[in-house]
Image (cartoon, grey):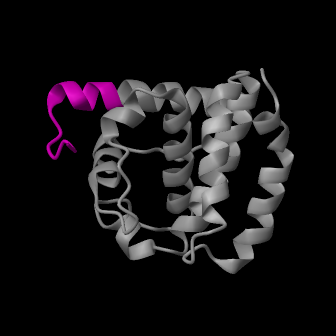
Amino acid sequence: MRPTSLSRDLRKRIVLRLREATAELKAIGYKSRRISPKEFHNYMTGGTPTGDTITILDVLDNKFLMIHEVVEISELKKLGIPINEDTVMRGYPSPICETHYTATVREFDYALRKRNYDWLKVRMKHAKSWLEDPDTPQHLVPKLEALIKKFSWVLKSSI
């Protein structure tokens, strides 16, 4: 179930997680844009054309997903795209796929830095599924293949 209203407790939690993710990203050389709790909430609870089942609470409970979403929203803001509950639906497949790819690269690099190989394994499977998705823009396919190749050792390892 996706929360639809921004309670005071949820707002506080979002603020805290946004600060943590922003600081982690800054430490690895990524300057994120300022994201308000309302923008984050609306973006995370808006519709998706792919039937995404990850909720705002899932993201708030996972540092890697927070990194991903902060980068994704920041990249959209850098493109001048308003962040609200319609952003994904209006921007799909492009520029949503492009910003999703950029966010995935940063998420993978962060997971590698944290030596969380189990997380990388899970997300590598997700990245591989994009190659079978007919909505994936063709110009992203070589980039996805390179990303998968770069991290393919993770799938083969028993770490």
Q: Quadrant of the N terminus?
A: top left
- For the point 57% across and 66% down, the residue is 97
Q: For the magenta stretch, what is the residue range? A: 1-14
- For the point 57% across and 77% down, the residue is 134
In this view of the protein, which residue sits in the foreground, 9 or 51? Answer: 51
Relative to residue 74, is residue 131 depicted above or below?
A: below
Numbered disc total? 0
Quarter-of-image position of residue 50: bottom left
- For the point 35% across and 63% down, the residue is 48
Relative to residue 13, is residue 95 depicted above or below?
A: below
Counting from the top left corner in percent of width and height, residue 157 is at 82, 29
In this view of the protein, which residue sits in the foreground, 87 or 35? Answer: 87
Counting from the top left corner in percent of width and height, residue 98 is at 62, 66
Residue 12 counted in the magenta span: yes
Residue 31 visible? The answer is: no
Relative to residue 82, is residue 66 depicted above or below?
A: above
